[in-house]
Amino acid sequence: MRFAIMFLLFSSSAFAQNHSAAPAVPASCGSVVAQFDVKHDSSKHTLAQPEPGKALVYFFEDFEEPHGGFITPTIRLGMDGAWVGATKGASFLFLSVDPGEHHLCANWQSSSSQISRQFSLTSFTAETGKVYFFKVAPRVESYHDLGNAWRKDLAQVDADEASYLLGISSLSIPHTHK
C-alpha cells in the first residue's frame, strides 16, 4: 500500500511538471500566452510609402481553405522578440521598422498545442526607404500515416505578388485579448 501511495505521488508530480512546461518559443516571436482577435477593413488600399529614416514591412496571409473546411486561422506575426500583430484569412498588415537586421516569426494561434507549437521563421535586413513583403501561407496537409500536418510557410515575395495580394486582401486590425 505504501508503495502504491508513493508511486501515485511521484507520478502525479511528474505529470504536473510535464504538462505545465510552456513550449519553447523562438527568440524572434512573442510570448506564447499572447492572443489576438482580428477584425478586417475591406476598403481598397494602396501600398504605403516608408516614413523618413524607416523601412516598411508588409505581411500578407494567403490562406487556402481545405475542401469542406471550417477553419480560418489567426496567424500571429512576430519580429525581434515581440508579436507585432496578427492576420486572419486573406488579410494583411504593415508596419514601419528601423533599418537593420530583423528576425520574423509566424505562428498559428490555436488552443491545440500540436498546432500552436509550430513556427515559421525568416530574417531580412531592412534599408532606409525600402518596402519589404512577406507572405505567410497556412496550409492543412493530410498524410496517410501521420494524419493532418499544419504548415505556415513564411517567405519574402516581390512587389508584383504583393500588389496582387493587396488587391484580394483586407487590412487586418488585430487587438490583443485582455
Image: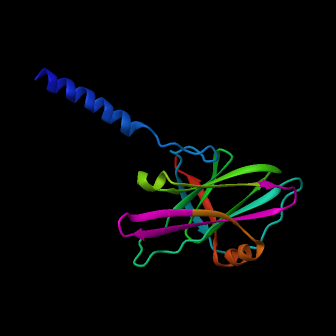
User: Where residue 157 appears, x then y in whole percent?
Assistant: 71, 69
Is 12 left or right of 45, judged from the image as shown? left
The answer to whether one can see residue 111 in this image is no
The one nearer the camera, 171 or 134, is: 134
User: Where residue 177 appears, x then y in whole percent?
Assistant: 52, 50
Q: Is residue 136 magenta?
A: yes
Q: For residue 122, which quarter of the picture?
A: bottom right
Q: Main secondary structure of the magenta part?
A: strand
Q: Is residue 144 above or below residue 98?
A: below
- The span picked out in magenta is 125-152
The one nearer the camera, 86 or 39, is: 86
**For the point 52% across and 75% down, which residue is it?**
64
Q: Is residue 35 above or below residue 21?
A: below
Outermost residue toward the top in this view:
2
Q: For residue 50, which quarter of the picture?
A: bottom right
Outermost residue toward the left in this view:
1
Q: Is residue 143 magenta?
A: yes
Tally of numbered discs = 0
**For the point 41% across and 72% down, which residue is it?**
70
Outermost residue toward the front in this view:
145
**For the point 39% across and 78% down, which residue is it?**
68
The answer to whether one can see residue 11 in this image is yes
Image quarter in which the N terminus is found: top left
Is 43 left or right of 52, judged from the image as shown? left
Is 173 left or right of 3, judged from the image as shown? right
User: Where residue 96 appears, x then y in whole percent?
Assistant: 77, 55
User: Where residue 175 appears, x then y in whole percent?
Assistant: 58, 54
The one nearer the camera, 113 or 147, is: 147
